[in-house]
Amino acid sequence: MGGDPGRHRGRRGAGHDDQRGERLRPPEGPHRGLPGRRVRRGAGAQGPHRDPRGRRGRRGAGRRDRHGLPHGQDRRRQGLGVAGRDGRAGPHRRPRRGRTLTTTERATRTAAADALCAGAYRDSGGPDAGAALVAVGGYGRGELAPYSDLDVVLVSDPGVDVQEVAARVWYPLWDSAAKLDHSVRTMPEMIAAADADLRVALGLLDVRHLAGDPGLTMRLRTTMLAQWRRHARDRLPELQELVRARHELVGEVAHLSVPDVKEAEGGIRDATVLKALVATWLVDVPHVELERTRRAMLDVRDVLHGTAGRASDRIGPEQWGDLARGLGLADARAAQVHVRELGRRTAHLSHLTWRRVDAALARPAANERVRRPELTRLAPGVALSNGEVVLDRGARPADDPVLLLRAAAEAAERDVVLAPATAARLAREAAPLPDPWPAEARQAMVRLLAAGRGLLAVWETLEETGALAAVLPEWERVRLLPHASAIHRFTVDRHVVETCVEASALIRQVARPDVLMVAALLHDIGKGGLTEHSVAGEPIARDIATRMGFEPEAVELVARLVRWHLLLAETATTRDPDDPATVDLVASRLAGAEALDLLLALTEADAKATSAKAWSTWRAGLVRDLARRARTSLDSGPTPAPVADEVDIPAEAGAGGLALQVEVVTDGTRVTVVAPDRVGLLADLAATFALQRVAVRAARAWSQGAYAVSVWELAEEGLDPSVLRQRFESVVQDRAGVAARLRRADPDALDPAVVVRPEASTQSTVLEVRTADRPGVVYVVCAALAELDIAVRSAHVDTLGPQAVDVFYLQEAHAGVLGDQRAAKAAHAVRAALSAGTA
C-alpha cells in the first residue's frame, strides 16, 4: 500500500491514511465516528491506464492485482461482492416503500455489512491476535441507513505490521460498491488522536468489533470510555460549544422549512451526543424516551434515503408526501408533524440534559465533599433543588389549582429548569383551574409570559409533558403548524413564544403589560383554518381572556389587538402616511391611545420574532411614524389634508436638466430628483434604479409649478450621484431597450393581483399590486400608467418572502382622483404589463 498511495485516494482529496503515524482527520460535526478517507470504487485520479471503471491497468478474466488478490468478478464468485444484487438483503439495499422502517431492517443491513467486513479480513489472512477491524460512528452503533458509509478502522498493537493486511481488506470492500471511510492506526495512535481531538474521542465511544482480536477491541473500547469519563469535566464545555455552533449554523428540525434530520438541532446527531453525555456518568436522560425518539428519527432517515435514491438528510418540500407513504402516515402534513415533533422532543431532552450538565460541572468533583441537595422554598408548594424547580414536601397538587402556573413562573423568572417529572405530575394530579381563573392564576400566567428568555425552556417542558393542555387547550390549534410565509423563521407555536419573549422587553412602554403579554400569546391563535387568521383569532382570544378572569374592558382590548395585530405593519408599508385616510383608518380601528401603544409594542414584538428583515430600521421607522400620526389624530381629531413640500428649484432643473441629490439616511439612501414635469419621468427614474439593482422602498412625487419633484427611499447605501445620472441618461436614450430588459415576466410565476382600493384615500386612487418580486416592478407599473397619462403621486414598496406588495397613489395628470372607468383601465393595463411583459 505504501508504494502506491494513489490506489486508494478517495473523492475527498489528496493525502492518504494507510501509513501508521499519519494524521487522523476529524470529520465534520461534533461526534462523527473515527474517520478515514472515504474511498469509493473507481475513485481517484484519472490516468492513461485507467479503464472506464476507474481501475488501473488492463482488465481480463481471472486477472489478479499487484497484491495477488483476484479482481472484482472473481471476488464475487467467492461471495465477497455486493450483497443484495441477487435479491438478498445487503448493507446498502434501498428500503421498501409503503411501510414503516424497523430496527430489524437496520440490524439486517448491519449484519450484512459485518459479514462483508469480517469475510474481507478473514480472506486477507489478518492475524487473530494483535490486530482487529472495528466499526466506529454510525456503523459502530448499528445505525446503517440504505446509503450510509461504512466507517472502519484497522487497529493494531505496536510492532504488529498490518500494511499488507490493510490492502487485502480494503479491496473487496471497494469492489462491493460500499462507500468506505477507513484508516489504519496503532492502539497508541488511537489514544493520542482521541486526546487531541474531541470529535475523534466521541466517535471512538461507539467502537464495535468486526474481525480479528476481540481482546484488542475490548481494550480499545474500555480505554476510550475510561478516558472519556476521566476527562469529561474538562471536555464537556468544548463539546457544548461545538453543539451550540452547529445549532446556530443549521437551525432546528422543528422549524426549518427544509429540515436536516441529522445535523439540525433535535436531529440524529443530537441524540448521539446525549448518549455520549450519559456515558460520562455525570448526568442521565430518560433512556426509553430517547431511544424511542432516536429510532423513530432513524426510520425517517431510512425512508428519506429510499425516496431520494441517495444519502440525503434534508427533507425538501416536495418530499413530504413520499415520506408519509414510506412511514405509513396519512399525508404530507402528518409527516411534517411527525418529524417536527420528533425533533422537538429530542431538542427538549438536549436542552434539559445540557442544563443538568451545567449544574453537574458547577458542583464539586467526586473527590470533594458533597452535601445533600437542599430544598430552597420559592413559593407555596414550590422549591428549588440542584438548579431545578420541584415541589416542596408540603405541596398538595389536588388542592392547589394554581400550583402548575406558580411553579412554571418561578422557573421561567429564574431561568432554571422546571423538572419534567414535576410538570408531568402536576398535569396528572393538579386540580383543574376554575372558570374564570382566580387572580393568582392570571398573574402567574402573565409572569410566566413576561419572563424573557427563561420562558422558552419552561414552555417547552409544559408542552412535552402535556401540562400545557390543561392550561391552554387551544394551543393544539397552532402546535407545530408551519407558516405559509417564507419570511418566518419558526413554526407558528414557536413564533408565538418568541413574540412573548420580545414583548417582555417592551412592558415598560405600555399601561397594561398583562394585556400585552396575553395578546402576544394569542395573536396567531386563529391560524390553521381557512378564515383569515386575525378574524378567526378574535373570538378565540376573547373566550380565552374571559376564562383567564380579565375584566370585560381588558377582554375587549385583547380581542381588538388580536384582530388588528397586522394593522400598523401592513398600513405603514403599503399606504401613504401623508394621506389623511391612512391615519384615519388606523385611528378608527383602535379605541384610544392606550390601544395604540399596546398595538405598537405588539407589532414590534411580532416583527422581531418573525425575522430580522421584518423589523429593519426602515420598517421600524415607518411603523413608529404612522403610530405617531395616529396618536395625534386620536388626541386632536381627523387628519387635515396634506400640503406638498415646497423645495427650492435647483438651477440645473431651471435650465431644463435633471437635478439629483443623494442623502445618506439610516439603513439606506434618500434621493431627491427635480426636473421639468413630463409624463413618464417617474418610470424613467424607476428604470434607473432597477438597472442599478437598487431596491426601492418608497417613492413620493408631486408637481411644483412646471417642475416634478420626487423623493426616493432606497435600500442601498453609498450611491454615486454621477453614476445614477449616467444611468438615467442611458435610460432616456434607449427606452425600448430598457423596456425589453425590465419587462420580462417569469412564465412560471403566479398571475399578478392588481386591485383598486377606493376606501384607502379620498385624495387619490389607490392601486395595490401583488406580484413576484423581481427588479423593475415599479418601472413596469409606472410605465404602463404613463402611457395612460396617469400620474403617480406616491409609491410604497414592500416585499414579503418571494412576493412584492406595492401600492401606488394615482391622480389624473392635472389633478384629482380617477373615475371608476379610468381606475379599472389603469388596473387592467398594469395587470397586462406585469403578466405579459409588455405595457
Image (cartoon, grey):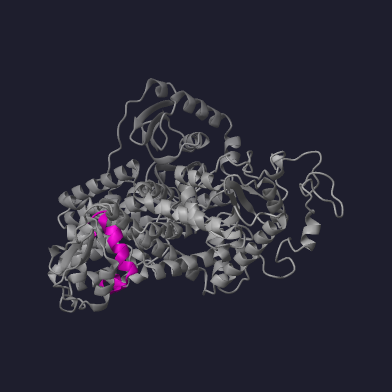
Query: Which residue is nearer to you in this view: 797 or 836?
Result: 797
Q: Magenta includes 461? A: yes
What x and y, as percent, mark residue 60? 87, 51
> Magenta residues, as a range?
449-473
Question: Would you say 127 lies left or right of 59 here?
Answer: left
Q: Is residue 48 left or right of residue 536?
A: right
Q: How many marks?
A: 0
User: Is residue 95 placed above or below 489 in the rendered structure?
Assistant: below
What residue do we see at 20% from left, 78% from top?
A: 431
**Left or right for 290, reference 463:** right
| x and y, in percent, of residue 300 in the image | 53, 65
Instruction: Name the residue at 52% across, 45% down.
Output: 188
Rendered location of residue 587, percent (x, y): 23, 55
Predominant secondary structure in magenta?
Answer: helix
Q: Is the N terminus in the top left, top right, bottom left or bottom right quadrant? A: top right
Image location (x, y in percent) of residue 127: 65, 54
Whether residue 368 is visible here, answered yes or no, is: yes
- Residue 834 versus residue 644: which sits nearer the camera? 834
Residue 602 sits in quarter? bottom left
Q: Is residue 26 visible?
A: no
Pick the residue in front: 448 or 416.
416
Q: Is 797 one of the magenta-colored residues? A: no
In the figure, is residue 349 to the left or right of 106?
left
Q: Which residue is drawn at the image coordinates 47% and 28% (left, top)?
A: 724
Q: Is residue 421 above or below residue 371?
A: below
Q: Which is more toward the observer, 831 or 447? A: 447
